[in-house]
Image (cartoon, rainbow, N blue to C red):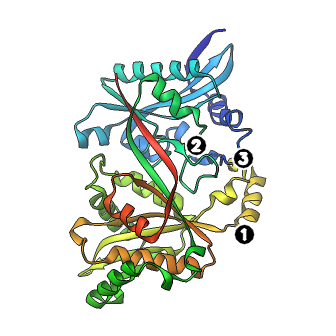
């Protein structure tokens, strides 16, 4: 049987590319479909990524039937900042047991990368750094939280078999508020002590809620903090403002101002933390929002959300040592409990992130999902 790899070019191709995932996950109760409006923006090259990068989408076909999908891309901004020649792959899907197709798609990705002057292939990312980073390697027994991906166990095994090496692991933590009897005053004493000293020194105004009425100004402030806070990580490259703004805009319908906290010193933003309702608990019933009636299913399911996702706690290294991270951490927990959430996801943090992993461990959270990013010299 003949295996071919063809470029996604027509509206029909884009639909087939998107719909193929339903074949892969038809027996997986934990899969949450990606949203069609967001996938369509990528497939039509209207996503923010294409303002600073380039990419293509490909269908693997066997005798005319789609048996795999992959995207190939170059993040020019990231390469420029890091002085690298790296291509990335993402949007990767293949059926169980079909290593032949997986290998053919990666071979195609390597050839595409070489023709563009690249010397290394990394992934998966689809395509921005925060979009589906890594293959899931731990935590297949539960659904992903908002902004996290899901895949069958054989994807990472296939990658290793092809010759990819581990680049980095990303960790997702889970914390059940029953551990502290739904009372933040039962949190670890060390965190409360650090937070107390911070509040004595800087006052309650050191941490404020987001001002959604100042949306554009807040985005600019937090973009600076985001890049400064993560610059300490060895594999980090600055996130483009267009991408940061695009991701923030996509999340805006979900934002609860009470769950967006900004730390300030001398009137300047130096940190922020973001919590979101775990909308994936509802989206798992919404068919990717392909049709008008899917929005009704989503609206009904949203009423039953029990968890929230603590997406990020970012702090400018220049502000380390003040205890602001402890204040934001505890205040987020207090607010989530008050709003009726019973558990919290904390994702995604790099395994080499010193501040976040220390806080999560001190609070008693456990790693419940692990994502692995891969690299291959080509």
Q: Residue at x 43, y 65 (%)?
A: 360
Reading the image, the residue beneath label 3 is 29
Q: In the rendered view of the protein, which quadrant contains the C terminus?
A: top left
Horizontal and vertical percent position of residue 261: 42, 75
- The first of marks 1 and 2 along the sequence is 2
Could you give the CA–CA distance between mark 1 and mark 3, rounded to whole angstroms? 20 Å
Q: Is residue 239 left or right of residue 345?
A: left
- The answer, for residue 210, to whether it is visible in the render is no
Residue density around tag 3, few if under 14, some if 14–19, many if 20 or more, within 10 Å: few
Could you give the CA–CA distance between mark 2 and mark 3, rounded to whole angstroms? 21 Å
Horizontal and vertical percent position of residue 167: 36, 38
Horizontal and vertical percent position of residue 358: 36, 64
Decide which of 10, 308 is in the foreground and name it: 308
- The first of marks 2 and 3 along the sequence is 3
Reading the image, the residue beneath label 1 is 303
Q: Residue 246 has which mark?
A: none
What element does badge 3 sit on?
Answer: loop
Residue 306: quarter of image = bottom right
Decide which of 363, 27 is in the foreground and name it: 363
- Label 2 or label 3, whichever lies nearer to me, is 3
Q: Residue at x 73, y 38 (%)?
A: 26
Reading the image, the residue beneath label 2 is 39
């Amino acid at each position: 049987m003949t295996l071919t790899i063809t470029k996604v070019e027509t509206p029909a191709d884009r639909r087939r590319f998107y719909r193929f995932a339903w074949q892969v996950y038809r027996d997986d109760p934990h899969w949450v479909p990606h949203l069609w409006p967001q996938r369509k923006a990528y497939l039509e090259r209207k996503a923010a990524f294409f303002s600073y990068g380039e990419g293509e989408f490909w269908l693997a076909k066997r005798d005319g039937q789609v048996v795999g999908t992959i995207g190939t891309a170059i993040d020019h901004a990231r390469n420029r900042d890091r002085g690298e020649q790296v291509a990335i792959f993402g949007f990767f899907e293949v059926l169980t047991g079909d290593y032949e197709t997986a290998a053919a798609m990666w071979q195609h990705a390597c050839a595409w990368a070489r023709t563009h002057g690249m010397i290394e292939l990394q992934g998966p990312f689809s395509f921005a750094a925060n979009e589906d980073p890594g293959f899931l390697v731990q935590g297949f027994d539960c659904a992903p939280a908002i902004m996290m991906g899901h895949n069958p166990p054989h994807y990472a095994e296939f990658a290793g078999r092809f010759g990819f090496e581990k680049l980095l692991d990303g960790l997702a933590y889970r914390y059940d508020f029953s551990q502290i009897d739904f009372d933040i005053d039962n949190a670890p004493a060390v965190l409360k002590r650090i937070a107390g000293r911070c509040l004595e020194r800087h006052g309650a105004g050191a941490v404020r809620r987001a001002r959604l009425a100042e949306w554009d100004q807040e985005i600019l402030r937090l973009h600076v903090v985001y890049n400064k806070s993560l610059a300490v990580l060895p594999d980090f490259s600055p996130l483009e403002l267009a991408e940061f703004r695009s991701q923030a805009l996509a999340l805006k319908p979900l934002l609860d101002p009470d769950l967006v906290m900004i730390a300030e010193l001398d009137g300047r933003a130096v940190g922020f933390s973001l919590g979101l309702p775990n909308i994936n608990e509802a989206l798992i019933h919404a068919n990717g929002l392909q049709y008008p009636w899917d929005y009704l299913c989503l609206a009904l399911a949203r009423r039953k959300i029990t968890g929230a996702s603590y997406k990020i706690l970012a702090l400018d290294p220049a502000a380390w040592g003040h205890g602001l991270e402890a204040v934001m951490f505890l205040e987020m927990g207090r607010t989530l409990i008050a709003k009726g959430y019973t558990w919290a996801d904390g994702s995604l943090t790099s395994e080499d992130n010193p501040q976040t992993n220390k806080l999560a461990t001190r609070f008693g959270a456990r790693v419940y999902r692990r994502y692995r990013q891969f690299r291959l010299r080509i």
